[in-house]
Amino acid sequence: MMSALLACKSATEHREEADKDAAAIIAQKQKQAFGKTEPFSIVQPADILRRRLIEAQKLLYVGPESLGTDQLEPIEHWPEPDYPQQATPAEALDESAEPYRISLLDALKVGARNNRDYQTRKEAVFVAALDLDLARNSFRNIYSGSADALAVGTGGAGGDGAIVGADVGVSRMLKTGAMLAGAIGIDLVKLLSGDSAFGLFTDLSVAIPLLRGSGKHIVGEPLTQSERNVMYALRDFERFKKTFAVDVASDYLDVLRQADRVRNAEENYKGLIVLSRRTRALAAAGRLRGLEVDQARQDELSARDNWIATVQTLESRIDALKVSLGLPPDARIEVSPDEMQRMVAIVRSNFADAEEAGVGGIETGDVPPADEAPTIPGLDKKNRGPMELDEEVAFRIAFDNRQDLLVRLGSVYDAQRKVVVAADGLRAGLTVEGRVTTSGARNFLASAFLPDGQLNFNDAIYNASVLLDLPFERTAERIAYRESFIALEDSVRQVQATEDSIKLAVRESLRQMLSDREGVKIQVESVRLAQDRVESTNLLLEAGRAEVRDVLDAQRSLLAAQNSLTDSLVSYRVSTLEMQRDMGVLQVDSEGLWTEYVPDEQS
């Protein structure tokens, strides 16, 4: 019974109620900010991929902290023995399928669940919702209650006794600044002889500020700011999700790019091994000089050195990807090679019309006379990809959708309100207070034999007062008022800086996409020419009409063209994602998966 009085709710019930209230606030603000709601929880699944990889691949780890909070040993006086909950058993990884392969979409989902910064950003939204719930509580009915007991010994016969009292009260702050409070209580005096008496009392009061600190815009300012802080936190998190998704995609595609470089280096190395063997055979037959054999051997060794370097770089890129996903660096994972083929198909589909019309400025018809003055074709701005929008169109889309810009714009209004609040602090203070107190208590042993106390408002005590605080000393308030204007100016500059950074990012993405698109077309043709050159120089070498150095030069040109083509393909794909991120139109759901922006469907 006593424990029920001392703790009406358990720690678990308090936590669950806080989670419920915060979730309701977040859903409300999501609807208000984005016109939709999506699942939001800071309870991270204990059985995340990081933990599964550590266990399935038997990776070395420091201790239970590496696996999750549910694995920690509860300390003494731990309030909730069953929280955090133990991980539910999940399907074990197929260790025979090592390394564990993940696609690009898998990487996005894994990052959303395992990345520590991602989780921290979600918790920031949740904390803002809890702060708002606390701010709202300031304007709710606040109930209070207390009980006390006192044993008294007088030393005289029959003078010993006990005093027991209890009271309950309620108070409420109105948004006008008025404070209402009321309490009712009972005192019970009981002598050890068995005689007893009780008394009742009430206490009602009201305080109303009339000048300084009055008005809804002043009193409700903390609540207003808390409401807006949740919106800002959601918008910041929405922006972070887009940036995070593009960063993960960039790291993932960077691994694919490096893997393609490894394949190119490997094929180049194999080709030079074959060439080195062929030159030795031709030299033995007296058809090549020893110098050319040495040249082929040197290039073979150089190719091996380049292959080793590209393999090591690939390992470093994979480790960087694992860290960005929140996975252990020593986990054995690999990316899906199918992703490169899908990416090539997506990018090349944008160039179908351009390829039919010719590639870049390369002549495809009759070659003009050599003495004719050449003309350099301009950049191909006609056959643009879907994300290569007109600059002003892209700016308008970005201004409407960039969540960080919306936060900056909201901060200007916040700063304006703070100027108003700071100005209020310069005024005189005038507060009207009233109080009514009745008492029929018998809280002394000497009065225990009197009749029981009754509430009698005829004998109540009425108090009224006016408190005037003249503004003679307002140095601190004056400084705060001046600083509020400085903060307002700073918030305006932040808007301007964000606006300029958006324009800069959009223009840079447009330039990069144009450059990469031209690069893809040029490198496609370069690879074709380099392949033809390798084949022809090999035939000429066999016929004794070319030197080994010609074949080596052709092989190096092919390797460089292949790597440049891969670079342009990956760069163009990343640029399209960055463009969507910079315009704020890349949609990322609660699982970390994206929905790309399609201009034709959105118009």
Image: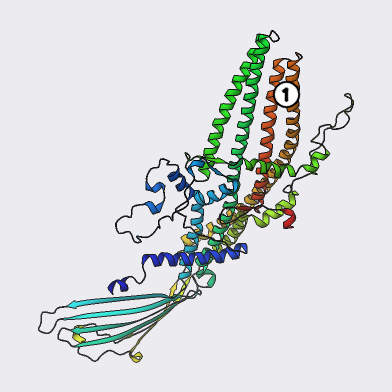
Q: Return the x and y of residue 466 as percentages of the image width and height.
A: 43, 78
Q: Return the x and y of residue 208 as percentages of the image width and height.
A: 46, 77
Name the residue carrying label 1: 534
Q: Residue at x 47, y 55 (%)?
A: 45
Q: Return the x and y of residue 447 as percentages of the image width and height.
A: 21, 87
**Residue 7 against residue 333 in the figure, above or below:** below
Looking at the image, can residue 424 be seen? Answer: no
Residue reaching furthest front? Answer: 96
| Quadrant that contains the C terminus | bottom right
Q: Return the x and y of residue 246 as percentages of the image width and height.
A: 61, 47
Q: Secondary structure at mark 1?
A: helix
Residue 360, quarter of picture: top right
**Residue 342 against residue 258 in the figure, above or below:** below
Q: Amino acid at mark 1?
A: Val
Q: Residue at x 59, y 65 (%)?
A: 31
The count of marks equals 1
Q: Residue at x 53, y 35 (%)?
A: 316
**Residue 102 against residue 304 in the figure, above or below:** below
137 left or right, relative to 241: left
| Pick the front one: 98 or 128 | 98
